Image (cartoon, grey):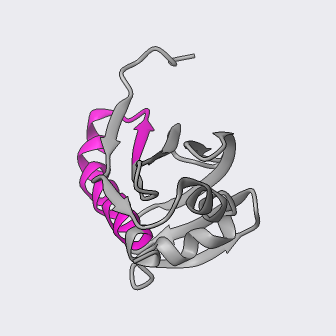
Amino acid sequence: NGTHRNMTEIKSKEVVVNSNSENIFNFISNLNNFYELLPQDKISDFKADNESCVFKVSGSVTVSLVHKESEPFSKLVLTGNEKAPFAYELHIFLEEQPNGQTKAWQVVKADLNPFIKMMVERPLKNLFDFVAEKLQEKYA
């Protein structure tokens, strides 16, 4: 079933967020809130409930994210729905710091052929760097 092929990993920048990991985890666990972290000038047709969201990236793909698993306050895993053009997971990591701040970053793991990888790698990195920055701003 192709699960042992090389998955492409795209890592966002790491940011330090001025809040504890529990607050951040509770915010991002409700996928209605994901809209606040997206570049609103570059997305459209955002729909969500607590467990999933879907949105279109301008001039590009429709992204769907469905809650797959979580480790409270440290990790959240979202996956594409069955309509996704390729298999992917978004791993959001939270690492609480001794001062009550939290280091946050994301890793996208995607099953991409070389052609699709070439097209989506930079836009996805930019998107998730933006999400990281917005999360940081939210608690600034």
Eyeballing the image, is 115 above or below 17? above
At x 45%, y 61%, the residue is 61
Locate the N terminus by quadrant: top right
The image quarter containing residue 72 is top right
Locate the C terminus by quadrant: bottom left
The percent coordinates of residue 16 (x first, y second) are 34, 59
Eyeballing the image, is 4 above or below 63? above
The percent coordinates of residue 136 (x first, y second) are 39, 69
At x 28%, y 49%, the residue is 121
Foreground residue, 41 or 91?
91
Q: Is residue 66 left or right of residue 61?
A: right
The percent coordinates of residue 84 (x first, y second) are 57, 48
At x 51%, y 70%, the residue is 56
Foreground residue, 129 or 48?
129
The percent coordinates of residue 93 (x first, y second) are 47, 44
Was residue 37 drawn as part of the magenta stretch in this picture?
A: no
The image quarter containing residue 126 is bottom left
Eyeballing the image, is 61 above or below 82? below
At x 43%, y 32%, the residue is 111
Range of residues picked out in magenta: 106-135
Was residue 120 drawn as part of the magenta stretch in this picture?
A: yes
Q: Is residue 76 left or right of residue 12?
A: right
Farthest residue in the front direction? Answer: 99
Farthest residue in the bottom direction? Answer: 41
Q: Is residue 31 left or right of residue 140?
A: right
The image quarter containing residue 10 is top left
